[in-house]
Image (spheres, rainbow, N blue to C red):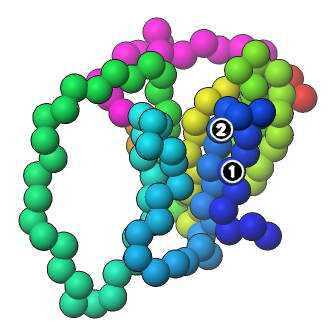
Amino acid sequence: MEYIETIKDDNEILAIIIRNNFSTEGVKFFTPDDFSQQLAYMHHKAGRKIKPHAHNAVKREIRFTQEVLVIKRGRLKVDLYRSNQSYYSTHFLDAGDVILLGGGGHGFEVIEDVDMIEIKQGPYAGEIDKTHFEEKT
């Protein structure tokens, strides 16, 4: 099994999956610099210090929402769709897995009771942020 999966439709990144057993030294970014949601893995040895810092106010333009799911417990089926809403692929996530949902669309089915954390940029725009469509396989 791959520890990192980048799922693409042509050049569009639909999702990036980081499996729970991925590990590397230092800092590893998985997302391109132009993604509105950035995703990285960090491993530092005990005693390492990271200088105190604050993030500067920088105006950014977000064209669409990208989200990250962290699976704490259970099993989740993720169906990925192209930007034209046609089915692309299915992936299963287990406890400890992380997925960044980039472009295209997605749908979910809970296979085992799941606890997960969702992270996405705000402010929340409500239902105008989504277009629902029929499930296609």
Chain part drawn in magenta: 121-135
The secondary structure that dominates the magenta segment is loop
In the image, what residue occupies the spot 45% across and 36% down? 34
The secondary element bearing badge 1 is classed as: strand
Q: Nearer the viewer, residue 116 or 64?
A: 64
Where is residue 81 drawn, in percent x and y? 75, 28
Q: Which residue corresponds to mark 1?
A: 6
**Residue 114 shown left or right of residue 2 in the figure:** left
Kindly identify the amino acid type of the residue bearing the numbered disc 2. Ile
- Point out residue 84 in the picture as x, y percentages from the top left corner: 76, 16
Q: Is residue 76 left or right of residue 22?
A: right
Identify residue for label 2: 13
In the picture, residue 108 is in which quadrant?
Answer: top right
Please say if 1 is above or below 8.
below
Count of numbered circles in the view: 2
Q: Quadrant of the C terminus?
A: top right
Q: Is residue 101 magenta?
A: no
Residue name at image x 44 percent, y 19 percent: 63
